[in-house]
Image (cartoon, coloured by chain):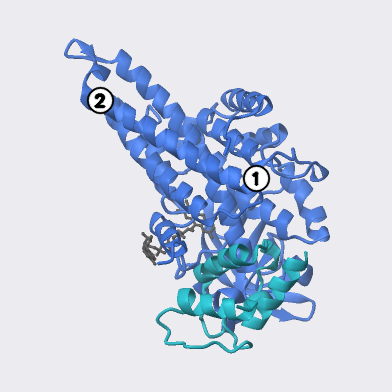
Chain colours: A cyan, B blue
Amino acid sequence: MSVLESLENYLLTEIAVGLGKKTLGPDEDLLELGIIDSLGLMKLISFMEEDFGIRIPDEEVIPENFQSLNCMAKLVELQVQN
Amino acid sequence: MDFSLTEDQVTFKKSAIEFAEKALNKGAKEREKNREFNQEGWEKCAEFGVQGLSMPEKYGGLGMDIMTCVVTMEALGYACRDSGLLFAINSHIWTCESPILKFGSEYQKDTYLPSLCNGSLKGGHAMTEADSGSDAFSMKCRAEKKGDRYVINGTKMFITNAPIADLLLVFAVTDPKKGFAGVSAFIVEKGFPGFSVGKPLELMGLKTSPIGEVVLQDCEVPEENLLGKEGAGGAIFNSEMEWERSCLFATHVGAMAKDLEDCIRHVNERQQFGKPIGKNQAVSHKIAEMHVRLELSRLALYKVAWLKSQGKRAPVESAIAKLFVSESYVQNCMEALQIHGAYGYSTEMDFEKNLRDAIAGKIYSGTSEIQKNIIASLLGL
Ligand SMILES: Cc1cc2nc3c(=O)[nH]c(=O)nc-3n(C[C@H](O)[C@H](O)[C@H](O)COP(=O)(O)OP(=O)(O)OC[C@H]3O[C@@H](n4cnc5c(N)ncnc54)[C@H](O)[C@@H]3O)c2cc1C
């Protein structure tokens, strides 16, 4: 599974539960749509750190890095390189 | 996991206890009655290094690791009878100084940290509003960029240190479309145009800790005082809360240890029906339960400190610690009061004051119910 697929799968099964979403577009704004709230973000960060074996510094927890699947995938790529 | 303390930590803990007993308790009863902040105690704590405990030496701090900070706070909680002063100091450290160190620009760190460490500046943070408490990110306070500054409008409630603070970390919405991710944090000085503070609020406890309302009316904040990037408010707030939930609550563990010692002495000395009251199982079981809660509270906090010292996140563990310590402290205060009978109920002793102070711990830094929500949510519910 690619990073993008894995993130989409996690969001659909763990965070966006009950919202009736079957897919998420790679550039869909998940913050504006209210799909990720503050507790959801905490869960998502734990998942990303564990699943991709990365550490996301608190300073990187900003909207640019979490507003869409593509943004998150870029963040993962960057942290893997680091 | 190894929670054993180093020799240095044991020595520092002892010196913090001696310091607090000597320097912080004189006149505590009077100040409590007059709802008076202990400015002299604040200054003495700064001289001892409390305000700069966790800060790098470069800014005048002691550069202590988190375990030493927790142990020191425990020592102060044990020996200092003025929990309002300790509450004010902890808010200053964990909700103002620490986020500036972690998220601040070089300019912000150089400008504010040395004076926050030496105690000449006092800080705090302003998140809560009249209509947004637990649901903190639904705040109304807005910050709009106008040229090289932000203009902030809104009112904040229940802000620790507000009446005495020189600067506050103010949270405001910069992008209303983005929900919690549209919240940013600003370092606001008391002298900025449009910033004002109400009178200290009258609360049930923590009477020596000034807490008040903050009004921001077209308050002008230079853009260099935005902390972190726009939208980083959520991350800053969560990071602050993780630290506060471990270090501030260490003072409660210290206070629980002191109360337990007092209770054990009392039940051995106080005679009724021809024997020490501690010889009644109904009383000795209370003591045993108090000890269990104290030990488990300490372990929960040390686990958070250990995780953080490994550079790990501790959202569930810090919520568990905050929930367990604050609830346990209230229960132990109730038992201590009961064990001391009418003397416990009297204002001559500290037990009724401790109970009033302890109850606040179930509300600030996220209520007990919200800690349970965090734990459940992170367990996948
Ligand atoms: C001594 C003290 C110092 C403080 N210092 C500061 C400070 O320095 N800065 C700052 O910004 N704020 C500060 N606060 C405010 C504090 O953070 C809030 O009081 C707290 O977040 C709760 O908000 P609230 O009082 O509006 O209660 P509400 O949010 O209105 O909650 C009322 C009750 O409903 C429950 N509840 C609410 N939502 C839920 C839910 N989803 N599930 C289950 N139960 C729920 C709560 O647990 C509580 O029991 C301080 C408060 C106190 C008491």
Q: Quadrant of ligand 1?
A: bottom left
From what the image shows, is residue B300 above or below residue B290?
Answer: below
User: Looking at the rendering, which quadrant does residue B351 occupy?
Assistant: top left
User: Mark 2, residues whose alpha carbon is within 10 Å: few (<14), some, or many (≥20)?
Assistant: some
Marks 1 and 2 in Cβ contact (< 8 Å) = no
Residue A65, x across and y down, in percent: 67, 75
Question: Could you tell me which residue is drawn at 65 percent across and 47 percent down?
Answer: B310
Residue B88, x across and y down, in percent: 57, 45
Q: Which mark is residue B309?
A: 1
- Same subunit, labels 1 and 2: the answer reads yes
Q: Which residue is mark 2?
A: B283
Q: Is residue B49 visible?
A: yes
Question: Could you tell me which residue is drawn at 58 percent across and 76 percent down?
Answer: A6
Q: From mark 1 to mark 2, how far is it between C-alphas?
A: 39 Å
Amino acid type of the residue tagged 2 in the rendering: Val
The answer to whether residue B329 is left or right of residue B9 is left
- Between disc 1 and disc 2, whose residue precedes? 2
Give the structural element (helix, strand or loop) at label 2.
helix
Give the structural element (helix, strand or loop) at label 1.
helix
Q: Chain of mark 1?
A: B
User: Looking at the rendering, which quadrant does residue A8 occupy?
Assistant: bottom right
Amino acid type of the residue tagged 1 in the rendering: Ser
